[in-house]
């Protein structure tokens, strides 16, 4: 297992280098001149040239890339041209909000989807199977932004059960910043009111983001479980008189999880990249809104930072998936 882990870690290096090169190249190929935009419409040529020199934009592209790469290693992700703040400082504020919006729905999808898929396979062609099939088909067919608007209309405006948008009430003081996750920070501060408000604001966007991975995990888990139930070792365990619960949870569940783990790892990156619409609908202050504003103003350093952060998290999530897959299936660790 140690060699398997080290091999996966070594393979991350060229992936991350390639990602940084692609992000840097695309940012430089985008149309427009961000320096001129940042200098303002009244800026003279001398002022634009001075700002370009200050930001290092007048250097050759290879030198700019290696400077950027060297900065990444030491934690310098560049500076926003418009806000003049370090990109890493902005990411520390906005990234936890997006991660909270990814972890919560992914956790819900896993906790609900795996048992539901297992139950659907055991009760094949009975009401649990038909119910999960209908729910998954409906959940994966409706666009997330439409679901978000529908949930806002029903639960926020008509019923008044949950807030319409935002991450925390403007008139309330949020818990002290420790991790950036409001739910966790509220628990650390032992502030029950802040915890309740955080969960209320998180509920609608989390459910909106949850439905698509939930449907996929349920269907994948059902198909994998049905396949495992037909294996000879399961039939042998039944013939030996082992209890159905023991067979299901000791022998079937672990082997059926393999394909579902792959889907879960891919969905983490998919949710990260797809938070822009949900964050816009619910006015959620994450990296989606941050990147959108940067794109509209041609401020490419934040765009590069957001893209690189999403890429790194996606790569790390797949690394964790590979390690879990290797733990579940020892054959995957074979050279």
Image (cartoon, rainbow, N blue to C red):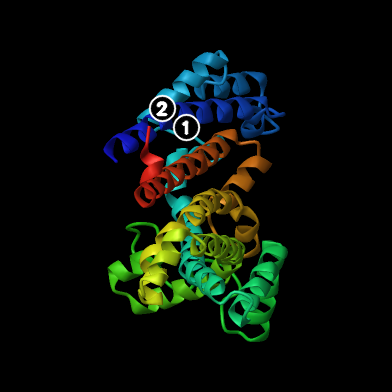
Question: Residue 240 location in percent, x, y?
Answer: 36, 71
**Residue 246 location in percent, x, y?**
35, 72
Residue at 61% x, 65% y: name it.
215
Q: How many dots with numbers?
A: 2
Front-lying residue, 15 or 165: 15
**In the picture, residue 179 is in which quadrant?**
bottom left
Relative to residue 49, is residue 180 depicted above or below?
Answer: below
Residue 29 x %, y %: 67, 25
Of 218 and 199, the residue lying toward us: 218
- Mark 2–mark 1 CB contact (< 8 Å): yes
Taking the image as shown, residue 268 lies to the left or right of residue 233, namely right
Disc 1 crowd rating (10 Å Cα; few below 14, some 14-19, many 20+) is many
Q: Mark 1 = which residue?
A: 78
Residue at image coords 62%, 53%: 276
Q: Percent position (x, y) of residue 197?
A: 45, 75
**Which residue occupies 65% across, 73% down?**
135
Q: 63 or 3, which lies in front?
A: 3
Q: Residues within 10 Å of mark 2 (few under 14, many from 20)?
A: few
Residue 253 visible in image: no
The answer to whether residue 79 is above or below residue 99 is above
Q: Quadrant of the N terminus?
A: top left
Residue drawn at the location 39% of the way across and 49% of the way down:
329
Look at the image and tell me whether residue 21 can be seen: yes
Q: Which mark is residue 71?
A: 2
Give the mark, 2 or 1, whose residue is nearer the N terminus.
2
Q: How far separated are the C-alphas under marks 2 and 1? A: 7 Å
Camera-side residue: 1 or 48?
A: 1
Outermost residue on the bottom side: it is 159
Which quarter of the rendered picture does the C terminus lie within? top left
Q: Quadrant of residue 38?
A: top right
């Amino acid at each position: 297992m140690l060699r398997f882990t080290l091999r996966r870690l070594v393979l991350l290096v060229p992936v991350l280098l390639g990602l940084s090169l692609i992000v840097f190249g695309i940012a430089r190929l985008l149309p427009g001149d961000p320096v001129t935009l940042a200098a303002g419409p009244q800026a003279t040529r001398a002022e634009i040239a001075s700002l370009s020199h200050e930001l290092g934009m007048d250097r050759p592209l290879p030198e700019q890339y290696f400077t950027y790469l060297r900065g990444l290693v030491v934690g310098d992700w560049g500076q926003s041209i418009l806000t003049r703040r370090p990109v890493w400082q902005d990411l520390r504020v906005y990234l936890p909000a997006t991660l909270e919006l990814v972890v919560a729905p992914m956790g819900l999808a896993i906790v609900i989807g795996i048992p539901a898929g297992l139950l659907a396979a055991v009760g094949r062609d009975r009401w649990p199977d038909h119910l999960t099939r209908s729910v998954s088909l409906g959940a994966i067919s409706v666009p997330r932004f439409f679901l978000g608007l529908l949930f806002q209309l029903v639960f926020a405006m008509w019923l008044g059960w949950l807030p319409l948008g935002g991450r925390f009430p403007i008139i309330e003081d949020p818990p002290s910043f420790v991790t950036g996750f409001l739910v966790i920070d509220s628990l650390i501060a032992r502030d029950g009111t802040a915890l309740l408000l955080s969960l209320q604001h998180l509920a609608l966007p989390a459910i909106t983001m949850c439905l698509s991975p939930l449907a996929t995990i349920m269907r994948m888990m059902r198909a994998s479980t049905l396949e495992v139930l037909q294996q000879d070792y399961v039939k042998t365990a039944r013939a030996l008189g082992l209890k159905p619960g023991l067979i299901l949870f000791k022998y079937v569940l672990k082997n059926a999880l393999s394909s579902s783990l792959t889907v879960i790892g891919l969905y983490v990156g998919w949710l990260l990249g797809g938070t822009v619409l949900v964050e816009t609908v619910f006015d959620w202050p994450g990296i989606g809104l941050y990147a959108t504003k940067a794109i509209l103003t041609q401020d490419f350093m934040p765009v590069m930072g957001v893209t690189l952060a999403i890429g790194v998290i996606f790569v790390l999530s797949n690394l964790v998936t590979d390690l879990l897959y290797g733990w579940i299936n020892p054959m995957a660790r074979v050279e």
